[in-house]
Amino acid sequence: MATDVIESLSPRLIAVAEKRGCAYDAWIFTNGYLLSQEVVDLLGRCRIGHVHIPLDGIRENNDAMRRLVGGGPTFDRIVENLALLKPPIKTLIRGNTHKGNVAQLDELKELVTKRARETGNRLDFYAASLVDTSSRDDPNEQMAAYAFDGIEVSLRLEARHVPVGKDHSCVAQNLWMVAIDDEGYLYKCGGKLCGQPKFAYGTAHSWDPALPLATASNPDMLSRFLNTGTPEPGDACYECEWLPMCGGGCPQLRLFGKHKCPPYRAEPERLVLAIHARKHR
């Protein structure tokens, strides 16, 4: 983990928030392998209250995807390190899902739940597919069930982060939410684009959140993402009755990919039933 990047940018972000009387919170995306008490203490000082860790299945499946440079395993150490993430830190475990490991989803979820009981820590689990699919057309029914009912009530996997009924759909449409890679580059997308400097809008060492556009090395990249919050006339989303629900979908796909509508647009009854089931669990 790039602790120097965290220590460089976090104090400036916190100072801007305090000057304006705003609350401040931050996430960190990490494989969890190098977590230590020293790192956890740093997260506390920098007000990083959420830790997001991906796993690719149980033990051998995960180690086949997430191995050390020399080929060594990582799964057991990552699971052991979860004990360090004491409250008030909240940890989100993402089960990266594909056809080779989908049968392990329930086992992985149970492992995370058990680890939460053992440690007393806040460990939440969700599954997310690594392939471009939806619950309507994926032949793998088990994966489809997780995609449809387990992630934000049937939103497309690419738009999993869209909170229904909120005024912005993700990091991309909120100026004060920043994705940072391990080299210190700043992005408006914490997914596929993060880690590709050509899509960065600045760096942690030079970007000043008090002067966001003036200090951005690529201000057009910043403004393009922010502008996806309100569809322009002529945009396919502009007159769609589902816009308040989906927020226009994934901004990254709208700008650099193939925009796709959520499956509930064609299956509104199933959406209503899924929401009802979630509210009455």
Image: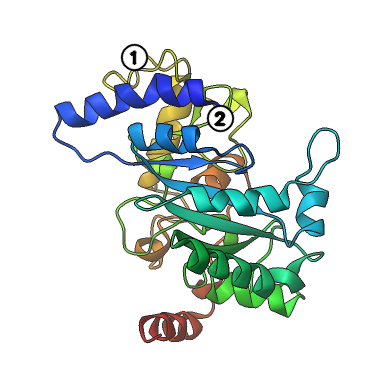
Specify the color scheme.
rainbow
Category of crowding for the residue at label 1, using alpha-carbon neighbours closer than 10 angstroms: few (below 14), some (14–19), many (at least 20): few
Percent from the top left, x then y, of residue 213? 35, 20
Percent from the top left, x then y, of residue 92? 50, 56
**Tag 1: amino acid:** Ala
**Tag 2: amino acid:** Asp
Q: Residue at x 48, y 19 (%)?
A: 203
Percent from the top left, x then y, of residue 75? 71, 52
Q: Is residue 121 shown left or right of residue 31?
A: left
| Quadrant of the rendered image containing residue 122 | bottom left
208 or 268, nearer to the observer: 208
First in residue order: circle 2 vs circle 1? 2
250 or 144, nearer to the observer: 144
**Residue 177 visible in this rendered orientation of the protein:** no
Q: Are marks 2 and 1 in contact (CB under 8 Å)?
A: no
SS assignment at label 1:
loop
SS assignment at label 2:
loop
**What is the number of the mark on residue 214?**
1
Category of crowding for the residue at label 2, using alpha-carbon neighbours closer than 10 angstroms: few (below 14), some (14–19), many (at least 20): many
**Residue 21 visible in this rendered orientation of the protein:** yes
| Quadrant of the rendered image containing residue 66 | top right
Q: Residue at x 48, y 40 (%)?
A: 28
Is 55 rendered above or below residue 47?
Answer: below
Percent from the top left, x then y, of residue 197? 60, 23
What residue would you read off at disc 2?
181
Q: CA distance from mark 2 to mark 1?
A: 21 Å
Q: Residue at x 48, y 32 (%)?
A: 38
Q: Nearer the viewer, mark 2 or mark 1?
A: 2
189 or 84, nearer to the observer: 84
Q: Residue at x 76, y 58 (%)?
A: 59
**What is the number of the mark on residue 268?**
none
Is 153 rendered above or below residue 169?
Answer: below
